Image (cartoon, rainbow, N blue to C red):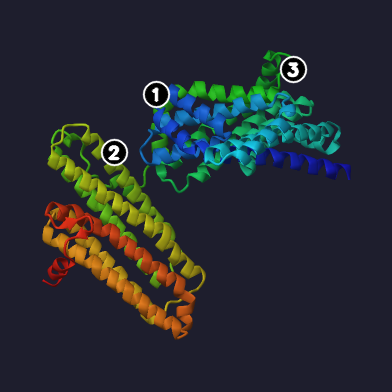
Amino acid sequence: MDATIGLINLLGAGALILWGLRMIKSGILSGFGASLRQLIAKWTGNRVVATLTGLVTTLAVQSSTATAVIAGSFVARNLVGPRMAQAVLLGANLGTAITAAVLAHDLHWLAPMLVLAGVITDGRSRMARGKGVGKALIGLGLMLFGLELLGGATEPLRESQVMTAILAALADGPVFGLILSAGLAFLSSSSLAVVLFVSMLAATGSVSPALALVLVAGANLGGAIPPCLAVAAEGIAAKRLTRTNLAVRAAGALAVLVTAGTLGPEFAALLPPGTRFAIAAHLAFNLVLLAVFMPLLGPLDRLAQRVWPDPEAASRRVSYLDKSAFDTPSLALAGAARETLRIGDTVAAMMERNLKALQVDDPGAREATSDLDDQVDAMLSDVKLYLARLARGELNDADTRRANEIMSYAINLEHVGDILDRDLAEMAEKKMARQVRFSVQGEEEIAELYRKTILNLELAQSVFLSHDVALARRLMAEKVHVRRIEEASQRQHLARLQAGRPETLASTTLHLDILRDLKRVNAHIASVAYPILAEAGELTESRVVSIRKAETAQTG
């Protein structure tokens, strides 16, 4: 019974520490997330500053995983170089070790004050930043409570014959200790909590210095796995970043595993009396990794690109964004326009795949649509950065207008991609999961509106490229036509609903939501015509001067 209660106390203390960590992370990210992202994006000019940025960010959010996810998303969008992002992660690892060193001190007397201050701050604040600070203070207080409970729970372990036998077995087979510690850090998504637990065991004399060193190395190894999973949808650049960080920690853990028998006692002899061995080992481990790999960021990045190369399709993708054309703005703008047309072609492919998924159940459609949307996001980021760099030079009024038109159309296409990925693809997934079927008439109405939207996108591509006023009028007329198709489909759907058609009753929400979203898509597509008609004097603040002109152009 005592053993059971001791185990419950141990697990409860660990859960309280993890919950406190989660509250700190969510509180700081909700209140200061944008500022931290700006910090990482801005302060990565050189490897030393990038390392300090990663360290400060991790000290703030108490999570190297959160720092890795932010850095990974920036690398995927070409906002931060892979070498500087790797420096950020090295700093984040050290930030976690510094946090452990601070928490290892007896600060449990602060816990009630922090919880009280957090509750008051959260209750009195009306802004997200204040509430985030309150939540973080409560989380830190809970962590300190948890550490106090963990200290009390680990004291009886010294007397436990079962724990003594387990630790003796791990000391005889350190590779199993490394795997166990890494597994605990992975399952808890926190190397910090495992290191603190090992520190408690080491303080009671339950583990030898050599075994403590191996367990700390395993915790660092396991803590590098969650970021790899967290950025799985961010693209190959983000995956390469976190996998390289995992490889760096794995190299360090392997070195510790081989040398722990000799290194552990020698390192313990060097420490002043009263020093927490596991905490010092955690700091030393990450400092050594920082010192070894900081000068090797270039070779490390090249090696990572060989081990995890870009997908074949992506590596062969031809970009029309020629940086050598900046001296000739007209050529640079032509390249940016052609790249934007590629975005439109990718969006059209998303639309066709989405229509097929609505007609025929396809479990892989959502993932395929998301992949295409990632391509759209990457191309838009390239176009924006390219035009921003072009704008630093001297552009005449005509070139400036064309650059703005390209940017506006590319952004509208990205919005269309988001609607297809976030809303319409989700509806296709819901239709498949719920086994919903449209009526024959309803499915045909939706398919007609999809086909009309795809044709309108093709027309918008021509309008964007040719700058033709007649085509712009026709696109505006098609927008009006789409609205009429949508209104007619709504009326017919409601008529079927009133008639009590079973398939209509089951699909009514999906049907109307799809019509609404396709109407939004067409609005974004038609926006390419506005500057052309405005330049021709056919656009006022209420848009087109005469819809009849557009309708006449359509019929003509």
Residue 96: horizontal and vertical position, in percent?
Answer: 59, 30
Residue 344: horizontal and vertical position, in percent?
Answer: 26, 55
Pick the quarter of the image with the C terminus.
Answer: bottom left
Residue under the image location 39 percent in, 41 percent down: 76
**Residue type (three-letter) at the residue carrying disc 3:** Gly
SS under mark 1 = loop
Residue at which label 1 appears: 46
Question: Which residue appears farthest toward the right when viewing the image?
Answer: 1
SS under mark 2 = helix
Q: How far is the residue under mark 3 from the one under mark 1?
A: 38 Å
Front residue of 87/451: it is 451
Pick the quarter of the image with the N terminus.
Answer: top right
The image's mark for residue 274 is 3
* First along the sequence among labels 2 and 1: 1
Residue 535: horizontal and vertical position, in percent?
Answer: 13, 51
Please say if the residues under marks 2 and 1 sit with CB atoms less than 8 Å apart: no
Residue 343: horizontal and vertical position, in percent?
Answer: 27, 52
Residue under the image location 17 percent in, 61 percent down: 545
**Residue type (three-letter) at the residue carrying disc 2:** Leu
* First along the sequence among labels 2 and 3: 3
**Left or right for 64, reference 420:** right
Q: Is residue 407 visible?
A: yes
- Looking at the rendered image, the disc whose residue lies closer to the viewer, 2 or 1, is 2
Residue under the image location 41 percent in, 79 percent down: 494
* First along the sequence among labels 3 and 1: 1
Residue at which label 2 appears: 385
Q: How far is the residue under mark 2 from the one under mark 1?
A: 20 Å
Does residue 498 lie above or below 389 as drawn? below
Q: Residues within 10 Å of mark 1 (few under 14, many from 20)?
A: few
**Residue type (three-letter) at the residue carrying disc 1:** Asn
